[in-house]
Image (tube, rainbow, N blue to C red):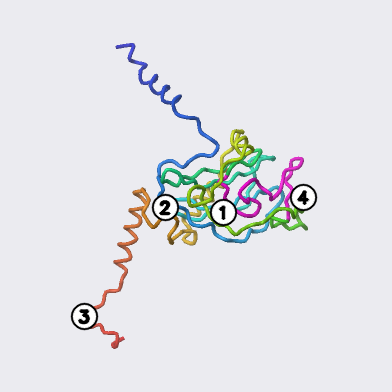
Amino acid sequence: MRKFRFLPLFLLAFFALAIPASTPAQVAVGISVHIGPPPLRVYAQPICPGPDYMWTPGYWAYGDAGYYWVPGAWVMAPQPGLLWTPGYWGFAGGVYAWHAGYWGPHIGFYGGINYGFGYGGVGFAGGEWRGGHFFYNTAVAHVNVNIIHNTYVNRTVIVNNNSHVAFNGPGGVRAVPTREEMAAGREQHIDATHEQMDRRDNAQHNPGNAYHGNAPGGNRQPHNNQARAQHNNNKQHQEKSKPQHKPDDHPRDR
């Protein structure tokens, strides 16, 4: 019986090696979303709060009650020289999956989604690092040049905000990674900062960020028990909140 003592450890090591290593574009686990994300919201970029802040565009996240908007924000990079590759929704096999964003030395693939403000679908035109400090392209970024002096103007950047499609794949943006984006995807990366994660989680509790319309893919409920329960609770609450009229309660009596 002694030879079987280490069998569980052996099986654990076997399955650990069998699981593919995590990739830079992490896919959300634990939920299969069969409803596509709504079009991206149109909004104005707030002014940059200070030197070396990086712009991270707004996007649709998914919670217990469905899609909700995470507003764009200026954040500090984990370390100088890093750029933010936004996350994106990808549609494949009948499921919309979220590919998380990350920090890295180069911009990777973000689905070809036009997030605006320098993220036109490929690369980033909002600025660049020079000698440990970030220089902003004021043709794209909203910066007070009287306070922030690390700026330049590149008016060759084409600003095209006509498309607001929020997912990649059939019915959405049909884009594939370039050779440069694939190389960037294999570089060393850093996940979203705690500040970014907190901002995402807090956005879920703001009613103004919730989405209540019909998104691509129909008005079907996702395979998410919590979302379905929340939907039923809301429906029951609405039924209870309806005014109850007595038989002798006529409109003319009011």
- Identified at 23% across, 78% down, the residue is 246
Q: What residue type is labelled 1?
A: Gly
Q: Which amino acid does label 4 sit on?
A: Asn
Q: How far apart are marks 3 and 4 (CA)?
A: 73 Å
Q: 5 or 232, which lies in front? A: 232
Q: Position of residue 201 (x, y in %)?
A: 49, 50
The residue singled out by tag 4 in the image is 150
Horizontal side, residue 134 vs residue 239: left or right:
right
Q: Which stretch appears magenta?
A: 110-138
Q: Which amino acid does label 2 sit on?
A: Ile
Horizontal side, residue 136 vs residue 29: left or right:
right
Sequence order check: which comes first, mark 3 or mark 4?
Answer: 4
Which disc, if any, is residue 247? 3
Q: Where is residue 152 in the image (x, y as percent from the top left)?
A: 77, 52
The residue singled out by tag 2 in the image is 35
Which disc, if any, is residue 58? 1
Q: Where is residue 6 in the image (x, y as percent from the top left)?
A: 37, 16
Task: Look at discs 2 and 3 and give the one toward the viewer.
Answer: 2
Q: 185 or 199, which lies in front? A: 185
Is residue 66 visible to the viewer in this orientation of the structure?
A: yes
